[in-house]
Amino acid sequence: QKEVEQNSGPLSVPEGAIASLNCTYSDRGSQSFFWYRQYSGKSPELIMSIYSNGDKEDGRFTAQLNKASQYVSLLIRDSQPSDSATYLCASVTGGGNKLTFGTGTQLKVEL
Amino acid sequence: EPEVTQTPSHQVTQMGQEVILRCVPISNHLYFYWYRQILGQKVEFLVSFYNNEISEKSEIFDDQFSVERPDGSNFTLKIRSTKLEDSAMYFCASSLGLAGGANVLTFGAGSRLTVL
């Protein structure tokens, strides 16, 4: 079973702090990784994608990938209350055509 | 910004009834998907569809499920005889190319199915 694992949280951070969300995956054939944000009752919304080892930055978000450790993370700088949501990690195996999602980590940004 | 449109937003049905969920993918996208999310659980892949045929399906997608692209714009998911455990949010998604790489999936707002 090809799994994507996340801590369900909730992860609570104060406004303005850095939130660090983590994800591990079991399938070494996974090539592409995605972070989606999901507000309660809404659909997943893409935040970041990452395919190569290292860091990828987009505004307040930084995705990190370590294929040797099978580990993906998302850093959110200057966290805002509007960032409060569930963050879903997902992977695609090379040549495949489906996203495998983790259970998501609930983030709460407190005033 | 182009979006994936789903109807209905919420459907309530009796166990054993047939349900059709409809989706209008982004117009130039070639790959179409259905995912579902049972309340409080992870988003699960059901099926992918390309060139008028199923390209991949999960073990969830059994004989009770079918998909169809009846015309140039709609993509439907049919559940033949609904069960209580089919109650979930169903998300349609589309992508320009194969998932992964630069071809990210865009999700619709979802159709909530409640089976009584």
Image: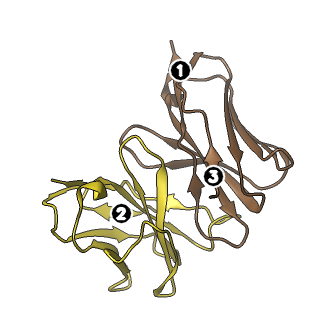
Q: Which one is nearer the viewer's eye here, B35 or B81?
A: B81
**Real-space CA distance between mark 3 and mark 2, rounded to the nearest whole angstrom:** 29 Å
- Horizontally, residue B44 falls left or right of residue A46, namely left
Q: Chain under label 2?
A: B
Protein chain holding label 1: A
Tag on residue B5? 2
What residue is disc 1 on?
Answer: A109
Which chain did the renderer colour brown?
Answer: A
Query: Mark 3 = which residue?
Result: A3
Can residue A91 be seen in the rendering of this structure? yes
Q: Is residue A24 above or below residue B106?
A: above
Residue drawn where x is 54% and y is 32% of the image: A8
Mark toward the viewer: 3 or 2:
3
Q: Residue at x 15, y 68 (%)?
A: B17
Q: Nearer the viewer, mark 2 or mark 1?
A: 1
Q: Amino acid at mark 3?
A: Glu
Q: Which residue is rendered at x = 72% and y = 58% of the image?
A: A32
Picture colour for chain B? yellow
Q: Secondary structure at mark 1?
A: strand
Looking at the image, residue A69 lies above or below residue B13: above
